[in-house]
Image (spheres, rainbow, N blue to C red):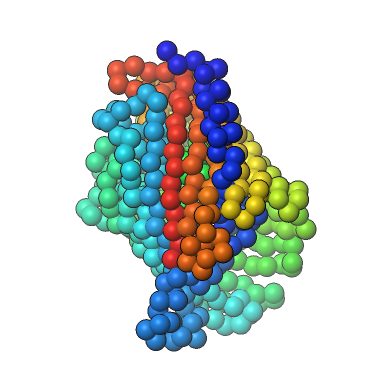
Amino acid sequence: MFYRKDAVLVAVAGLLASSGFAMADTAGESTKLSLDPRVVTAAADAAPAPLMGMLDKVGMGAPLSSAGVNLYGWIEGGYTYNHRKHGGDGPIAPGPFNHEVGNHFMMNQLVLRAEKIVDPTKLDVGGLVEVAYGTDMGFLHSSGWGFNGNDPTDDGNPSDPVPDKYRANYQFDVTQAYVDVGLPVGNGLTLRVGKFVTLLGYETIDPRGNPFYSHSWAFGALPFTQTGVLGIYKLNDQWKITAGATRGWDMTMEDINGCAIDALGQIAYTNGPWQGYLNFSVGPQNFDDSGHYRTAINPIVIWQVTDQLKLGLEGLYIYDGGMNAGVTGNQHAYGDIWSVDVYASYVINEYVTANARFEKYHSYSGTLGATAGAFPSGFSGLVPTVNVYSTTLGVTITPLPKDAIGKNLSIRPEVRYDFSEDEIFSAGNDSFKDQLTFGADIIFKF
């Protein structure tokens, strides 16, 4: 039997063994990447990369650049080992995205973006189209937006657990497709229309901005993308407000509850070494139920303590009176999720940044439907309340930070230990209260 003290010893040993590795930054600023949360301008900081350089050599780069268009992308592949699981045991909790099913290498994402950033101080038109392929894409399909003939909501009930055919399966997806219009109103207003990555959450589906290969439990309780209209307005150098309406969590061409819409917004504040974000979502999100509203409140605070040390704190609270309906038959059943996540990042040198994540996650719902946001997938049994404590320690290697091409390569090994008050982790025909995993991924930005 595997005991908690053994896991702690292994985790500490793993951290000591990897203390010479680092976290890489998507924009070449290693102190910035690992703790920046998902924000509405996340795609805007992508600097021209090798793909545009190659296009320059064939005479295509200059016309694109003069038109303000940037083509870029990334490829990510990784491996996760669970000390108990073997091939055929099913996904590793707390998926999605931690969905290794057989201790083997997976090509998670191959992504290409075409982007034109607008100037909000004048009348301007731009936007972004993002196409992707890989094992992550089966989890990213929004309602009515499934490709390869696979859409997890095709059965009309997204509260059902994600079938096995969506796991470790290479699929295609159009993750984002929106138009931005700059309007010279005040300090500048940007109107965004289309499908975009949600504002909610510290971690994002874009692996370049996360400190780890695996994701937090809170990440699995939130939507991936939303489709609708947003207005982005900069009040001054410190305050920015984003607000709008969408079709709901992971809804695009079809809506699980008719034409019901939800409100989505973000209040962002920056002052010297401090950044603060208050993300919120309010609206009906449950299958065939437009009478019960799900409210998500997601505050995030980031403190750049020194040039090397950065700390982050994320809170999440979700209240949804209809979340239990599929199990209890009571449309007024109470269900809520809350979590607290603490992040720390320390830049050792240009090659190395060490990262840590500590999380307490609580869910009361009575259903294990992954796409319902109640519990992430990969659990054993049906329990009304889950309390999980998770610790992740990792690093990112940037082996060639001075090379024009090599600086785009990063490697992120990690060790992770999860402990639950209930036996929610399944392996074979048994279930356990804890789980130890070792993972690593490779990212190349082009």
- Residue 52 position within the rendered picture, expressed as x and y whole percent measured from the top left: 44, 75
- The total of numbered circles placed on residues is 0
Residue under the image location 42 percent in, 18 percent down: 432
- Residue 131 position within the rendered picture, expressed as x and y whole percent measured from the top left: 36, 63
Q: Check the image and name the residue furthest to the right.
A: 272
**In the image: residue 231, left or right of residue 176:** right
**In the image: residue 401, left or right of residue 287:** right
Residue under the image location 50 percent in, 72 percent down: 48
Quarter placement of the C terminus: bottom left
In the depicted structure, whether residue 29 falls above or below residue 430 = below
- The one nearer the camera, 45 or 402, is 402
**In the image: residue 67, left or right of residue 112:** right
Splitting the image into 4 quarters, where does residue 9 fall? top right
In the depicted structure, whether residue 444 falls above or below residue 435 = below
Does any portion of residue 255 appear in the rendered image?
no
Q: Check the image and name the residue furthest to the top.
A: 1
- Residue 434 position within the rendered picture, expressed as x and y whole percent measured from the top left: 47, 22
Residue under the image location 69 percent in, 44 percent down: 311
Quarter placement of the N terminus: top left
Does any portion of residue 381 appear in the rendered image?
yes
In the depicted structure, whether residue 163 falls above or below residue 28 = above
In the depicted structure, whether residue 355 falls above or below residue 263 = above
Residue under the image location 48 percent in, 70 percent down: 49
- The one nearer the camera, 124 or 203, is 203
